[in-house]
Image: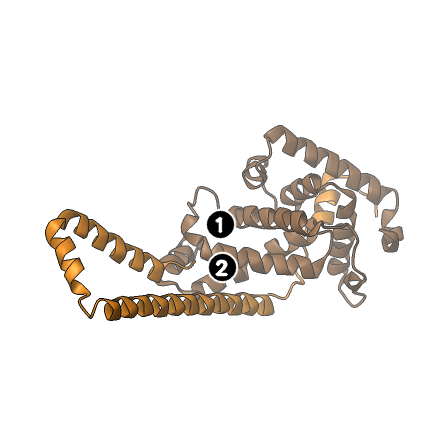
Chain colours: A orange, B brown
Amino acid sequence: MKLSTEQDFQQLLEYSDYLDGANFVETVQSNIKKQQQIRQRILAIATFCAALVVLVIAIMSGFQLWLPLIEFAQNSPYLFTVALTSIVGFSFFIRHSKI
Amino acid sequence: MNDQALIARVLLDNDQHAFASLVRKYQHPIRHFLRRLTSGDHSLADDLAQEVFLAAYTKMQSFRAESSFGTWLHSIAYRMFLNDRRKAHYTREVSSELVEPSTTHNAEQDILVERLMSHLSVGERTCVTLAYSVGMSHQEIVEITGMPLGTVKSHINRGKQKLVELVNSNQPQKRSSL
């Protein structure tokens, strides 16, 4: 094989068409599914932990959990709105992001 | 359906079929590109290609359509390769499993070129492959690699010169020793 022209060189470097794509695509899809399952498990664990913390706090406060929240909302309504918006926004982001 | 429509469906509806169409369309150039970069390590190249598409799926929201989707994927592939090389201290040895006697003439030529690539620096390999195999412009190569335009041009010229010398000096006959 001799490379005398630019065309010869281009032909040498051309990709061939023999790669089988079906298995590759399937593997990519199964990897994405696995990643989503891991994410769902992490979210489930985080939710469970948060629920556990809330339960412990509720028990420790004699199930008077809403009192501090009500006081907070009454004393600082703007700050309460900002906090609530942040929590809802973050939850929405977590739910819809693919990370 | 064009790339933009498929990307929109992935972003808005999390449509797996649309993403599969994108993978089907781009798996061929991305896998070949990585095979050239890894000098013919097919299993490593395919593993990296898998990671490229996984990263593309998770980072799809960051795709700004300033360049084509193919260019964006090539830049992810290039960065994946560099990261892997940094981590694994990539060696230039070519695995014996790469010798595939039952492959077609085109496949043999691919394997030959992948092996010839091991004689080039990473920069030369990348620029020559993107310029001649993918058919990208110098500006697109600059976007993918982040190298200055002058460096890209000199990599292409030097890489091409090396390959021409290797092939013209009957290097293919010594394939097993590459």
Q: Residue B177 placed where, x, y %? A: 88, 52
User: Considering the numbered disc 2 on the image, is that residue within a helix, a strand or a loop?
Assistant: helix
Q: Residue A71 placed where, x, y %? A: 13, 56
Mark 2 packing: few (<14 Cα in 10 Å), some, or many (20+)? many
B160 or B150, which lies in front? B150
Residue at image location 58% in from the left, 60% down from the top:
B50
Q: Which three-letter amino acid code belongs to the residue tagged 2? A: Leu
B91 or A15, which lies in front? B91
Answer yes or no: is residue B153 visible.
Answer: yes
Reply above or below: B78 against A35. above
Q: What residue is shown with label 2?
A: B22
Q: What residue is shown with label 1?
A: B69
Q: Residue furthest left?
A: A74
Q: Residue B76 placed where, x, y %? A: 55, 49
Q: Are marks 1 and 2 on the same chain?
A: yes
Residue at image location 53% in from the left, 50% down from the top:
B73
B155 left or right of A80? right
Reply above or below: A93 against A40. above
Q: Residue B49 placed where, x, y %? A: 60, 57
Mark 1 packing: few (<14 Cα in 10 Å), some, or many (20+)? some
Are circles 1 and 2 on residues that touch, CB within 8 Å?
A: yes
Reply above or below: B86 against B95. above
Answer yes or no: is residue A4 visible.
Answer: no
Residue at image location 33% in from the left, 70% down from the top:
A52
